[in-house]
Image (cartoon, helix red, strand yellow):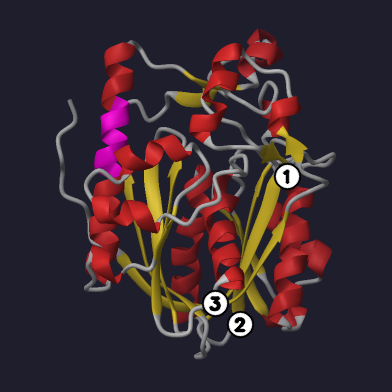
C-alpha cells in the first residue's frame, strides 16, 4: 500500500495569462460510432466521453495553429515574445524535433529563444513555472509563449489505449509579467510517483535496436503493471498524489477548499473523480471539466478553464485548481486566480 509522504512547497509564480488559444481539428467524431471492445462500450457512460477530434497533420501543426490563436487573442506583436516553450504531450512530429523552433519560425518570433519540455500532460503546466522564472530574471525580454499539442490518434487503436479515449488538439498561452486584470497563475506544484512511473509507455525506445521494433505493438500507448496488486497500489497512489498536490497549491495561496471556485481535471473518466478527490471531498461538486471530450493530453485542463471563463465570466475574484497526471509518473497542477 502507498504511504503518504511530504510534499515540497509549491513554487509561487505571480504571472498573468495575456491570452489562451486552442485548436481542435475537424468536426467532432462520435465515440459511439467507433469500433471498440464490448468492455469499453459498456463503460462509456461511466467514463462520460462522447466525442473526439482527429488531425490529418502532426503535433507540431496542431501546436502552431494553437499558438497563432493565442497570439491573435493577445493582440501583441511577434517581436514581444522573448521565449517559446513547447511541451508536447506525447511524441513530436519527428524524432529529434524541438517544436518550439518550428513555432518560432512559423509565427516570425525573431526575438525569441526556444525551449522544449518533455513531461507528458504535465508539461504544459510545468512550463508555466519556467515562463515565470524567465519573466522575473530577464524582465526586458518580453512575454513567453507556452505551447502544447497532443497527437494521440496515431498512437492508439481506435483512439483508446484501453482505459479511456484520446483526441488530437493543441493549446497555447501567452504569459506576461505586466500588471493587469484577468487570469493570473499564482503557483505550480507537482507530486511524482515512487514506483511504477514507467507503467504507461510506448514500448520502443533507445534501449533496443530499431530492428526489434514491432510497430503494431511497440508504437502504441500501453499500460503494463507487474501484477494486480501493483495496479491497485497505483490507483491508491493517484489518490494520495492528487490530494498532496491540492494541499500544496492551497498552502501557496493560504486557502482552503471553501475558497476554490472550480476544479479542472483532465477528461480521463468522470468516474475517477470520487477517488481522486477522496482527501478533498468538498471539491467534488466544484469539478467543472467537460468529460464529454476525449482526453486531449496537456490541452484538457486549461481548455476546460477557458470554456468556464467564457461561459460564466467571474464578477469578483475567483480561485481555480487545474491539475493533471503525466502518464503513471506524476501529478502536476496550477493555482490560478481571476481578478473578476
What quarter of the picture does the N terminus occupy? Answer: top left
- Relative height, residue 237 to residue 144 (above, below): above
- Does residue 237 show up magenta in the picture? yes
Indicate which label's residue lies in the foreground, 2 or 3. Answer: 3
| Nearer-N-terminus badge (2/1) | 1
Closest to the observer, 303 or 36: 36
Question: Is 229 displayed left or right of 325 in the figure?
Answer: left
Residue that badge 2 annotates: 142
Residue that badge 3 annotates: 313
Q: Are marks 1 and 3 in contact (CB under 8 Å)?
A: no
- Does residue 43 show up magenta in the picture? no
Measure how far apart labels 2 and 1 are at the Cα level: 26 Å
Residue at the (29%, 21%) spot, across then down: 232
| Nearer-N-terminus badge (1/3) | 1
| Nearer-N-terminus badge (2/3) | 2
Q: What residue span does the magenta drawing correspond to? A: 234-241
* Residue 144 percent across, percent down from the top left: 59, 72
Amino acid at each position: 500500500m502507498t504511504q503518504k509522504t511530504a510534499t515540497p512547497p509549491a513554487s509561487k509564480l505571480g504571472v498573468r495569462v495575456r491570452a489562451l488559444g486552442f485548436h481542435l481539428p475537424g468536426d467532432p467524431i462520435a465515440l459511439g460510432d467507433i469500433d471498440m471492445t464490448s468492455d469499453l462500450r459498456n463503460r462509456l457512460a461511466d467514463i462520460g466521453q462522447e466525442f473526439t477530434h482527429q488531425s490529418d497533420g502532426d503535433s507540431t501543426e496542431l501546436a502552431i495553429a494553437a499558438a497563432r490563436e493565442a497570439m491573435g487573442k493577445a493582440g501583441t506583436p511577434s517581436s514581444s515574445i522573448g521565449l517559446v516553450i513547447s511541451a508536447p504531450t506525447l511524441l513530436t512530429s519527428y524524432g529529434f524535433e524541438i517544436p518550439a523552433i518550428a513555432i518560432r519560425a512559423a509565427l516570425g518570433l525573431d526575438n525569441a529563444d526556444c525551449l522544449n519540455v518533455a513531461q507528458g500532460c504535465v508539461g504544459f503546466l510545468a512550463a508555466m513555472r519556467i515562463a515565470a522564472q524567465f519573466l522575473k530574471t530577464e524582465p526586458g525580454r518580453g512575454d513567453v509563449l507556452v505551447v502544447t499539442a497532443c497527437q494521440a490518434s496515431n498512437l492508439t487503436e481506435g483512439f483508446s489505449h484501453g482505459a479511456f479515449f484520446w483526441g488530437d488538439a493543441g493549446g497555447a498561452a501567452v504569459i506576461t509579467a505586466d500588471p493587469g486584470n484577468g487570469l493570473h497563475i499564482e503557483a505550480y506544484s507537482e507530486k511524482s510517483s515512487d514506483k511504477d512511473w514507467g507503467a504507461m509507455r510506448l514500448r520502443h525506445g533507445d534501449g533496443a535496436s530499431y530492428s526489434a521494433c514491432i510497430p503494431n505493438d511497440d508504437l502504441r500507448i500501453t499500460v503494463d503493471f507487474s501484477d494486480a496488486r501493483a495496479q491497485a497500489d497505483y490507483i491508491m497512489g493517484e489518490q494520495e498524489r492528487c490530494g498532496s498536490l491540492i494541499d500544496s497549491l492551497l498552502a501557496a495561496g493560504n486557502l482552503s477548499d471553501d475558497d476554490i471556485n472550480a476544479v479542472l481535471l483532465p477528461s480521463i473518466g468522470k468516474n475517477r473523480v470520487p477517488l481522486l478527490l477522496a482527501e478533498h471531498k468538498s471539491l467534488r461538486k466544484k469539478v467543472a471539466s467537460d468529460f464529454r471530450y476525449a482526453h486531449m493530453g496537456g490541452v484538457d485542463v486549461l481548455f476546460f478553464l477557458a470554456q468556464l471563463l467564457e461561459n460564466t465570466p467571474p464578477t469578483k475574484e475567483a480561485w481555480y485548481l487545474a491539475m493533471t497526471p503525466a502518464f503513471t509518473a506524476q501529478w502536476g497542477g496550477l493555482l490560478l486566480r481571476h481578478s473578476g
